[in-house]
Image (cartoon, grey):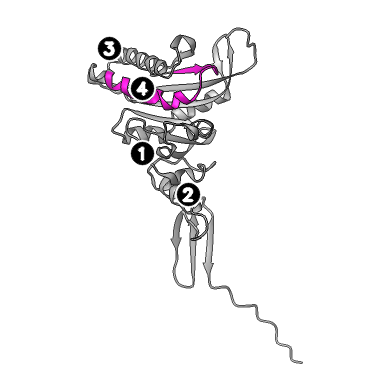
Amino acid sequence: MAGTGRHAVHRTMVLVDVERYSAPARTLHHQLDTREGLYAVVAGALAAAGVPWDGCYHEDRGDGVFVLVSPEFPKAPLVEVLPEALARAVRGHNNTSHDAAGVRLRLAVHAGEVAFDSHGVTSTALVDAFRLLDADAVKEALAASPGVLAMVVSRLVFEDVVRHCATLDPATFRPVRVAAKEFRAPAWIALPDHPYPPDPAVLAVPPPEVGPEVVPGGPMAEAASRAAADRGGGAGRRGVDIAGGVHGSGPGITIGAATGDHLSIGTPPPPAQQPHDPR
């Protein structure tokens, strides 16, 4: 990394974190076995994607690791090959380890500029990648999956890489809205070893830019999918999708939108009475 000075350089970011690393049943001995297994499966999955471990910058995170991949290695294998290789390697590790040393992983893939200094590496893009990795939506997607891996990719990676992959179906991804600290951004979640059913409707529109975090399969995600299907249907049915409650009865009702705004619909007031002119 010498010679870059204070100038940022482009890298693909691969971040991996162990689910419930500090669970009570996982003793120090189990944690050491877990970490050994983690590094073995990540290095093996990178190799399967054509990326040598020794050719990357990487840092330990105790219960995880992040890897910066040089631009000389294409991004497509990191979303086409690496996730499935990682899931296979994890299952192999779990089959030969104590239950308390078994792992399930969250994987985040992002890309952007990073700057190296004497302490390591930093950048806004790298911070954003960690926000994606730690998003509640990703944790809940993994918790609900019978598989061992949940992957989240940034909007940049989805639009520039996933949509154009020859061996990966982007319709098996689900759009989410990630909100963590000051970070607000759309992203996409996939379950590589237990994929979501293909749903072309989710590709009709990008995930919303702002608002509360959305969890795949939740009511807000389902509403977004229905809205995407309606908007992608071309000419024909037109409608209004309302997120919120409808209150009141009789001549007037109030529709409460998810944004907190309200629209009141009712009988218009009678016209103002004009004063009587005695002439």
Q: Nearer the observer, disc 4 or disc 2?
A: 4
Judging by the rendered image, the residue that carries numbered circle 1 is 196
Q: Nearer the observer, disc 3 or disc 1?
A: 1
Residue closest to the far front: 166
Disc 2 marks a residue whose amino acid type is Ala
Q: Earlier in the sequence, mark 1 or mark 2?
A: 1
Label 1 with label 2: CB-CB less than 8 Å: no
Question: In whole angstroms, how far apart are the C-alphas of marks 1 and 2?
Answer: 17 Å
Question: In whole angstroms, how far apart are the C-alphas of marks 4 and 2?
Answer: 32 Å
Judging by the rendered image, the residue that carries numbered circle 2 is 228
Asked if residue 79 lies in the magenta stretch, the reply is: yes
Q: Earlier in the sequence, mark 2 or mark 3?
A: 3
* Boundaries of the magenta span: 66-92
Q: In the rendering, at what x and y percent does residue 271 appear?
A: 63, 78
Disc 4 marks a residue whose amino acid type is Ala
SS state under label 3: helix
Q: Name which residue lies at 53% across and 25% down.
A: 111
Question: In whole angstroms, how far apart are the C-alphas of marks 2 and 3?
Answer: 49 Å
Disc 1 marks a residue whose amino acid type is Tyr
Q: Name which residue lies at 42% across and 31% down.
A: 167
Q: In the rendering, at what x and y percent does residue 227 appear?
A: 47, 51
